[in-house]
Amino acid sequence: MFGAFAHDHIIEAHDIKGCANIDWAKLDQSTVELTFTSSAIKVMDPDHPKDRPKVQETMETQVLKPGQFPEIRFKSIAVRSRSPESVTVDGDLTIRDRTKRVALNLTIKKINATSAEISGRQALRQSDFGIQPVKVMGGMVKVKDEIQTEFKLVLK
């Protein structure tokens, strides 16, 4: 009955907008700002297709609440180059109108003169953004506070 919450979930963010200015000669001079609508985040869970509607509903009504908090934003404040293809981007991440400073370790690959692929992983705690991890069945089934995110963006 509560199997929908007893496994890791895969979600995707769509409709991402933003601006990146990458200075390949001086990566530390680069900037990035991203915004996406929380209602455009969709549960994918390819191994659990029957669970998707319930998980999506819970994510919308208890976690992200897009009616109250329509956007998720990231704005860089500093970029530190670790190698030609590896940077740490410090910035402010805002979810549910709560902002937290994060340091993202990113891999950056130049595709051509006007495009780049950026990928990374980041652990986040839901409680840092005012989100109480979901509990079901009187608390017997709980979603972890810490979530792992992975992302790959193609910037043009």
Image (tube, helix red, strand yellow):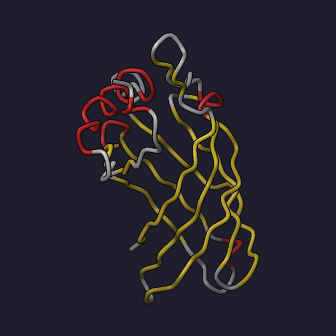
User: Residue 30: image x %, image y %?
Assistant: 62, 70
**Front one among 126 and 22:** 126
User: Residue 8: image x %, image y %?
Assistant: 47, 44
The quadrant of the picture occupied by the N terminus is: top left
Above or below residue 95? Residue 16 is: below
Residue shown at 47% from the left, 75% from the top? 117
**Dividing the picture into quarters, in which one does residue 90 lie?**
bottom right
User: Residue 155: image x %, image y %?
Assistant: 42, 71
Q: Is residue 37 left or right of residue 105?
A: left
Q: Is residue 58 left or right of residue 142?
A: left
The number of callouts visible is 0
Residue shown at 54% from the left, 52% from the top? 149
User: Residue 110: image x %, image y %?
Assistant: 51, 85
Residue shown at 67% from the left, 38% from the top? 100
Above or below residue 103? Residue 20 is: below
The quadrant of the picture occupied by the C terminus is: bottom left
Above or below residue 62? Residue 44 is: below
Residue shown at 46% from the left, 61% from the top? 19
Q: Name the residue furthest top.
A: 138
Q: Name the residue furthest front.
A: 1
**Front one among 66 and 11:** 11
